Amino acid sequence: MSQSFALVTPDPIDPARLLGDTLSPDDGAALLFWGVVRNQNDGRPVRNLEYSAYAEMAEREMRRIADEAREQFGTGAIRVIHRTGKLAIGQASVAIAVASPHRAEAYEASRYVIEQLKQRVPVWKREGYVDGDSEWVPGFTPAVREMA
Amino acid sequence: MIVRTLFFALYRDMAGADELALELPAGARVADLVGRLRSSGGLSRMPESPVVAVNMDYAPLATELRDGDEVAFIPPVAGG
C-alpha cells in the first residue's frame, strides 16, 4: 500500500478503519487528527457547513503534503481524507492519520499536514447559520510561485 | 486554441456556471484569460490577480496557455 494516501469523498469517514489502514508492523504509534464541525463561528450560531472541492486537485495536493511531511519528519504512512457535502455539528470534515515508529515525529507531521491543508488545498465551505443565512467562509490565499 | 475554465465557490456564484470552454488566440497567457473574463458579467467582480491553477498546479498569471489546458479559478481556500 502506498505510504501517502489522500481522498476527497462525500461519504462519512470511519476513524478505526483509517487508523488500521495507516499502521504497519514498523510503527509504534499512530495519531488521528479528527476535524469536526462546531456550533459557532466568531460567536455566530452555526447550523451546518457545506463543503465543496476541486476534488482531483485537492487529492493531488493533499498527497503532496503527506509526501512532504513524511520526508521532513521521517514518519511511516500518512492518510488524509476530506469530506464534501453538507455536514452537521459534530461530524468530521477532515481526518489525518499518521503512523510512525516514534511519537514525536508523528505529532509534528500531523500538525504540518493540517496547517498546509488549510493554506493550499482547494476546498471551500459555506456556513449555514441558525438564522437561515449562509456565507462562504473567508479563507487563505494559496501562495503561487513566480516563474524563474 | 480552446481552454477549459473551471469556477469554484465564490467565483462559481459570480460566473453562474461550473465551467466554460473559451477560445483564445495562440500564445495567450493566463493574464489575458483573466482580463477577458473580468471584462463583462458577474466575473467583473473577480479580483484582478486571482489565484489560478493550470492543469491542477498553481500557476502565475504569466503562464502561457496551450490548447486543451484546464484553468481553474481558485478563491481563498477554507478546508479543514
Image (cartoon, coloured by chain):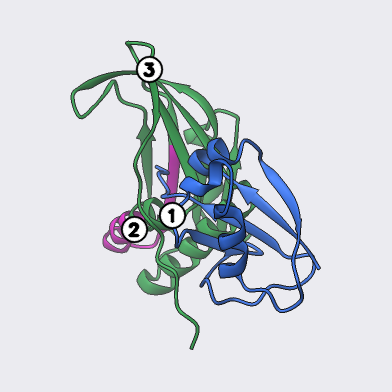
Chain colours: A green, B blue
Q: Badge 2: how crowded within 10 Å, few (<14), some, or many (20+)?
A: many
Quadrant of the image containing the N terminus of chain A: bottom right
Relative to the observer, which residue lies in front, A29 or A119? A119
State which quadrant residue A107 falls in: bottom left
Asked if the magenta segment contains residue B72, the reply would be no
Q: Position of residue B39 (x, y in %)?
A: 57, 54
Residue type, numbered disc 1: Pro
Evaluate if marks 2 and 1 touch, with contact meaning CB atoms under 8 Å apart: no
Residue position marked by numbered label 1 in the rendering: B47
The chain containing the residue under callout 1 comes to B
Whether labels 2 and 1 belong to a single chain: the reply is no
Q: What is the span of residues highlighted in magenta in the rendered image?
A: A94-111
Residue position marked by numbered label 3 in the rendering: A133
Q: Position of residue A140 (x, y in %)?
A: 35, 52
Compare marks 3 and 2 and give the one earlier in the sequence. 2
Q: Is residue A134 above or below residue A103?
A: above
- Label 1, label 3: how far apart the Cα atoms are: 25 Å
Residue type, numbered disc 2: Ala
Query: In the structure shown, which secondary structural element does the residue marked by tag 2 occupy?
Result: helix
The chain containing the residue under callout 2 comes to A
Q: Is residue A107 above or below residue A91?
A: below
Residue type, numbered disc 3: Asp
The chain containing the residue under callout 3 comes to A
Front: mark 3 or 2: 3
Residue position marked by numbered label 2 in the rendering: A106
Query: In the structure shown, which secondary structural element does the residue marked by tag 3 occupy?
Result: loop
Front: mark 2 or 1: 1
